[in-house]
Amino acid sequence: MPNAARLRDSTQIVLPRETLDAVEPPLSDKFTVTVVPEGDRQCRVIGSPVEIKAASEYLARRGVTMR
């Protein structure tokens, strides 16, 4: 049985809202992901493992570090 934490990490990214707002073009325009606000400070980007990997690489090329 797969590890739930590992599956979750491969299908979502959690970022500060201001970081996500600064990305152009928006992730949801470039990738097949859903951006869900989480409170006032964070957003959760949810997608398939392939899309999350591509979105992570895209963000890394723009200097965004992920935890």
Image: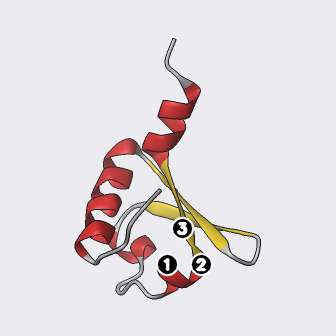
From the viewer's side, name the closer residue of 9 and 67: 67
Q: Are marks 3 and 1 in contact (CB under 8 Å)?
A: yes
Q: Which mark is residue 15?
A: 3
Q: Are marks 2 and 3 in contact (CB under 8 Å)?
A: yes
SS at mark 1? helix
SS at mark 3? strand
- Badge 2: few (under 14), some or many (20 or more) residues near its Cα, within 10 Å? some
Residue 46 locus on image (x, y percent): 52, 55
Q: Please state the total of marks drawn on the protein image.
A: 3
Q: Amino acid at mark 3?
A: Leu
Give residue 31's quadrant in the image: bottom left
Give residue 35's quadrant in the image: bottom right
- Badge 1: few (under 14), some or many (20 or more) residues near its Cα, within 10 Å? some
Give residue 65's quadrant in the image: bottom left
> Which residue is rendered at x = 50% and y = 51% of the image?
12
Identify the residue under disc 1. Answer: 20
> Which residue is rendered at x = 47% and y = 56% of the image?
67
Q: Are marks 2 and 1 in contact (CB under 8 Å)?
A: yes
> Which residue is rendered at x = 56% and y = 84% of the image?
18
The answer to whether residue 27 is above or below residue 12 is below
Q: Residue furthest right?
A: 39
Identify the residue under disc 2. Answer: 17
Residue 24 locus on image (x, y percent): 36, 87
Give the spatial CA distance, label 2 vs label 3: 6 Å
Residue 28 locus on image (x, y percent): 44, 72
